[in-house]
Image: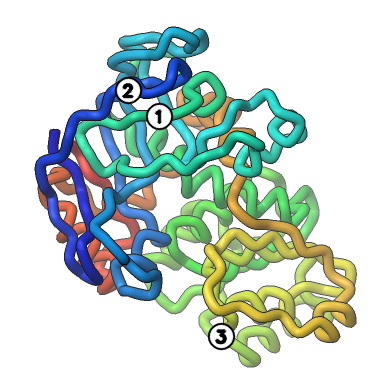
Amino acid sequence: MYGTVIHAPRDIRFEELEDPGIVEPTDAIIRVSATCVCGSDLWNYRGINEIGHPRPMGHEYVGIVEEVGAEVTTVAPGEFVIGSFFASDNTCEICRAGYQSGCVHSEPVQGAQAEYLRVPLADGTLVAAPEVPPDDLVPDLLAASDVLGTGWFGAVAADVGPGKTVVVVGDGAVGLLGVLAAHQLGAARIIAMSRHEPRQRLARDFGATDIVEERGDEGVAHIEEMTDGLGAHSVIEAVGTQESMMQAISSARFGGHVGFVGVSHGQSIPGERLFRSGIHLHGGPARVRRFLPDLIGQIVERKIHPGKVFDLDLPLSEVAEGYAAMDERRAIKSLLRP
């Protein structure tokens, strides 16, 4: 098969790889129908994460089950499945509490930007769609594999609910789908922080009521003006930098909630600042598997259309362009089709 391998910063190659096979009786092999480039992939692409050796890339995927191990019972060959970027057994105590990304047997799913993919712990990781979907639903279902589930978890972690004012820090795919999640969860006011007009339009399409273009102290001051000096009830942090985290904390009111789902890089939160803020802070690797059944149902019933975040659609063989376009902010999110 062919798949994506990163060799060095900005050195993405589409090359021949060994076909995956069943290793454990709990594995499944899927033929990938669609995959994509994640914003977190850019940390490797830009050389911020060290690349010690060539490695397969990709962790977002949907596809058709080709083969299953002897112990797999919940998915079968021929079914269209969606899975999370963390494999989980979905039976341990941590999983049962809804935190599958912290499963005691968890392992990352890697190498999804390829024609075929081995998925460990298939029973606890994969969710089958009711039927093989029409082509127009594939991008929506692919979004559920990561960015929709992550944005949704960010909203839940931020305690978004009816009547609340929500601020979303970050206008990438996760932030935009955090807007969608906040809207679906009944928020009264959703303030998207974005400087980019195409992303502002999409944020409004997903349910944003207001746009704030300022960042840092100016952005926080604008939020305070819009909330009678109190700050937001709920803030979704969807970037992962020091600036974005401090902006999120500073935008929340005393007693408010911050849900942080941006992959952390170089963050250091001053203890006294956090103590005096009086906020609830909750986040980390998103519990996508927890939300998949509900999100798939909403998508299949065409209640939500998260696939709108894909504004570049490419053959998988052109994956290098997909990375470059996102790195240069020519695309919000690149969809790749084998």
Instruction: Give the answer, above or below, for where 151 lies relative to 338.
Output: below
Give me the residue at 49% from left, 56% from top. Answer: 174
Q: Residue 119: which disc?
A: 1
Task: Identify the residue at horizontal 41%, vertical 33% (top origin).
Answer: 141
Nearer to us of marks 2 and 3 is 2
Residue at coordinates 38% horizontally, 75% vertically from top-left?
48
Q: What is the quadrant of the C terminus in the image?
A: top left
Amino acid type of disc 3? Arg
Q: Earlier in the sequence, mark 1 or mark 3?
A: 1
Type of amino acid at the residue the image marks with label 1: Val
Report helix, strand or loop for mark 3: loop
Q: Which residue is mark 2?
A: 29
Q: x and y percent of residue 80 in the render?
A: 36, 19
> Within 10 angstroms of label 2, few (less than 14), some, or many (20 or more) residues?
many
* Circle on res. 215: 3
Q: Give whichever of 29, 160 is nearer the camera.
A: 29
- Residues tagged 1 and 3 counted as in contact (Cβ below 8 A): no
Judged left or right of residue 41, residue 26 is: right
Rendering coords of residue 77 (x, y %): 33, 10
Categorize mark 1 by other alpha carbons within 10 Å: few (<14), some (14-19), many (20+): many
Q: Observer-nearest residue: 228 or 70?
A: 70
C-alpha distance separating marks 2 and 1 = 6 Å
